[in-house]
Amino acid sequence: MHNYKELFVWKRAIKLCAHIYKLTADFPNEERFGLISQMRRASVSVPSNIAEGGGRRTDKEFVHFLGIAHGSICELETQLYVSVELEFTDFDKIDFVTNEITEIQKMLYALILKFDSKLS
């Protein structure tokens, strides 16, 4: 078992969720069950999958859930760009969030590589 609460990437992913919830609060109300819901679920999925993997017994399982978290953060990044395209927000408002996403993606990838090398 891994102590996910000590992982800096998990802590940053939690903060990213808060930013996404605040950002999407300004989206059109008709998107409540569309893009808002998708973005919020994707953002929550990142730290949730890190935590779920951390609660598993093996490094292999942990890596599997880190991969799911990485997929979710890529999904979230795409949804941010869609929201800009639809003019629900603009690049100035998502700049901090996209930078955070890039950093979290790098951290997840590095963690995956670290555990993958231990498994090989």
Image: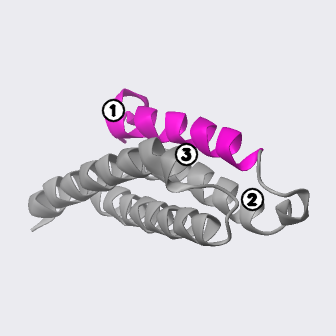
The reply to whether discs 2 and 1 touch (Cβ–Cβ < 8 Å) is no
**Is 23 inside the magenta-drawn segment?**
yes
To which residue does mark 3 refer?
93
What residue sits 70% from the left and 60% below the top? 88
**Neighbour tally class for label 2: few under 14, some 14-19, many 20 plus, Cα within 10 Å:** many
Q: Is residue 8 magenta?
A: yes
Q: Which mark is residue 36?
A: 2
Q: Main secondary structure of the magenta part?
A: helix
Q: Residue at x 25, y 53 (%)?
A: 106
The residue range painted magenta reads 1-25
Dot in front, 1 or 3: 3
Q: Is residue 54 visible?
A: no
Q: How many marks?
A: 3
SS for dot 3: helix
Q: Secondary structure at mark 2?
A: helix
**Frontmost residue, 27 versus 51:** 27
Q: Is residue 52 left or right of residue 34?
A: left
